[in-house]
Image: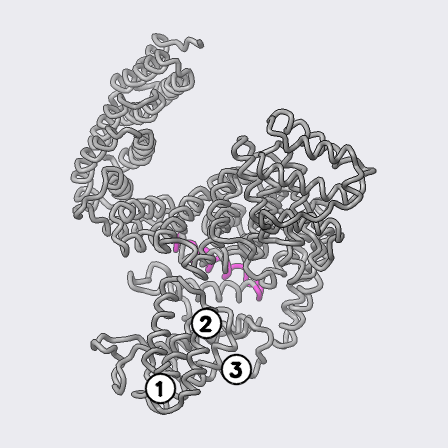
Amino acid sequence: MDLYELEHEFLQATDAWHSDDISNATLIDVGEQIVEKLRAIGGQDAETLAYRVRLGTLPARSLGHGMSHYTELKELLALHESDPARYPAHPNAAAGQQELVDADGKPLHDLLHGELHQIVNIPQDVNVPAETIMEALALADRYLSDDEARHIRITVLQVMDRADEVVGMLGSYLTPYDQLDDDADLSRWLHKHDVAAMAYLETSNWEYANLVLDEMAKAGSGTGYMPAVCFAESLIPMAEHTSLEKSVNRARHVLRNCAGCGGLRAAPMVQTATFLMLGGLNDKALALLEQTESTIEQPATVLNDLLHFFRAAVQMGSGDVRMPRFGSPRWQEAVGIDPQRVTCAELAEACAVPAYQQAEAFDRRNGTTTRVAFLNRTLSAPALEPHYFDETCLEGLAPLAQPPAYPRMDEDLDPDVQTIVDVFTTPRDDDEPYPELPDFMRDDDKYMRLRGEMMDDDQLRGEDAAQQLAAYADDPSLDPRLRSVIEVDLLNAARYLNRPVHATAMRALPTVTRLNPQFAVIMGMMLLMGLHSRNELRTPAAQAIGSYTAGLIACGYGNFTAGMRMDALLSQAGRLIEAKSALDDAARCLAADPDVVDDPQVARIDIARSSSLDLAALNNFAEAGAEAAQAAIVAHSIGDVDSTQILIAYAVDNYYYAGEYHTALDWYNRTQLETDPAPSAEAQFEVLAAGLRIVTLMDSEVFDQMWPSLSEMIKQPAQQWAEADENILFYNRLSRLVDDVSEPLARIGKLKEAREFTAWVAQHMTTAPHVSYQGDALVQQAAIFASSGMHHESALVLESLVQRAQAAGDLSTAQRGHAVLEFFAGKHAQAAGSIYTDALAANPINPA
């Protein structure tokens, strides 16, 4: 290949990397291969291109490749300094120029300068000597401004457990949140406060730590993992030194901003689960940790946190509780966990060995005793109540499942059993003979009879035989080999014939896993599909199968199709964190091989849209907004007008629910309804509804500017969507909209606008397919009338609701109208109590 072809190959790879089509590791591999080819070619032009390729891969090395990144950065800096025109500070810079611009003269950022900030990652690798870290700090001092170099030095020293030195450097380091400019780097501001808070915590300066944490709370959702990481890290150390309210609010922040997310947000979830455990919410803590396991990308990064959790479980009386998920193949390999020894007490023992080894290694490198002392802490937390965590991922969290134990991956199956499983899991040609059954199968008449009857075309006879065979598998005197084979047979029957033996069939999953873990994922998925068809996804068997299969997916045994289908199944089973993790795995599979689908861009939109829905269901609205926004960008890039606008509306709504109102408004301002072709009525309605929600929370100037036009513009698409054949979704959305905007309108004194809007909604709801939809609108309309002092009108609306509901036989909605009348009679007793009591007397509830 010539230089042009190699350059083109690398540009294609970097484009794919920027589009998330390939991973960091893939870009690094491609770059290294191209550099090797360039070195073989030789010459000045090849050397220059090799430099640009190495520089282009540098950002991909910044996470998880600390020492590799630093070594490469140091060499590239030296080359750049030797000849800046030949070796520019950005890979796309125009050749031979001192000024850093591209071929079109557009300014480029100094990539080398930016990558110097990644020096902060080097100390995370215990194998990097302290001398090398100090050398890296000297390099930062040489190239960066005093303020930037100071920030890097403080961060590195904190990672090296030298908190006393850090505290001494904090003067004028922090600035108040209210002094941040709109264009300020919030991420940098939060990172500085994180470092300061940790230094104060480690030096027992509780007052200053509390002040810094309070300041960070002003940043709202922040920037993804921050301030959640800091809040989680401080939860238990600060518990005795701050109010219960602040501790709970910080824990809620973590749950509402990290649930369903991997990377740097997995450890905060483990730490918060420990806080819940120590606070007495054992069941919630265990269930949360089980599902959070699927988000942990590298087991070694959370060993300390897991050790604290399992010790806390023992301390709080849950030491005997089994957590099979931590016996999956990756935990066997990374930590040496025995899948048959997975009680919390046993897991504490298993995690202690590598955790202490890791801590001792860091202490040796850093010249401290901090890490071991950290592991030896006695932890405590205040007593907690479940309702403290309403409207977080703990609401509706599926309980801890009890899947079968994963197999020991270093142990062989019985040869005869392996032969049978191999037949079951390996595709065969039609004319390929099956192996002869071993004697222990062929000689058991009961087994052979029931096995044949289970495959009968007669559904009832087949189900009865399957259930008898499942009962036979529980016979304690049965040959263990035959029991394993029966479980595999039942797995086959549940898979193909949907026989109702899933609870026994799932016991075959470990046997299949030992031989073919990828196939075990497919089998787990198909068992869940069968249970879904039976409306049994919330049963203990379904929960166990879902947990087991999610654990295998977390090990890397999934594929794109399994990830997408498992998302739907797990979300319906109430296992939303695992559902989101399955989607993340589908995204990784797609990035590794875009050819798994016909249209990768459409698949990315589907993944991001589904991720947004999962995250919103977990009450992680900020991340849900970010996912929807990313999907909108992709949809726009392929010209999908409808999806673009609907996804922008999703982003606006989620940022609204997250309390990130200005971000929501920024995204709303990106909507484009006047396109050719025009968006559908549904898309227009969703966008305008999102706009109406957000303007009710803006200042009066923005409200007065936007509300009149938005409230008028929504009427036409609402009418068009209502007239569509399948319009149930429209009434759901309209009902949610009137709930969302009525109270904020009343709160800011916009009662006239509220009356007009609720009247319009109430009129639309007269055509709704069920009177319950009218209930939402009429209750809001009555509330606005009452807030306006128009109590006669309010009572008339509620009377009408009760009468319509009773006429339709909807007792629940009638009772709702009655309850609101009773509430208003008490709330407005002095001004208009008799109006509501008269309405109650005139409209008694008549149970059918």
Given the image, on which type of amino acid does mark 3 rest? Answer: Met
- Residue 312 vs 724, above or below: the answer is below
Residue 218 inside the magenta-drawn segment = yes
Given the image, on which type of amino acid does mark 2 rest? Answer: Ser
User: Where is residue 507 shown, x and y percent of the image?
Assistant: 68, 42
User: Residue 62, labelled with which disc?
Assistant: 2
Tell me if 818 is positioned left or right of 690 in this view: right
Front residue of 826 and 529: 529
Q: Which residue is mark 1?
A: 48
Quadrant in which the N terminus appears? bottom left
Decide: few, some or many residues near mark 3? Use Cα within 10 Å; few <14, some 14-19, many ≥20: some
Tell me if 77 is positioned left or right of 503 in this view: left
User: Where is residue 602 shown, x and y percent of the image?
Assistant: 35, 51
Q: Which residue is mark 3?
A: 134
Front residue of 5 and 735: 5
User: Where is residue 553 shown, x and y percent of the image?
Assistant: 55, 52
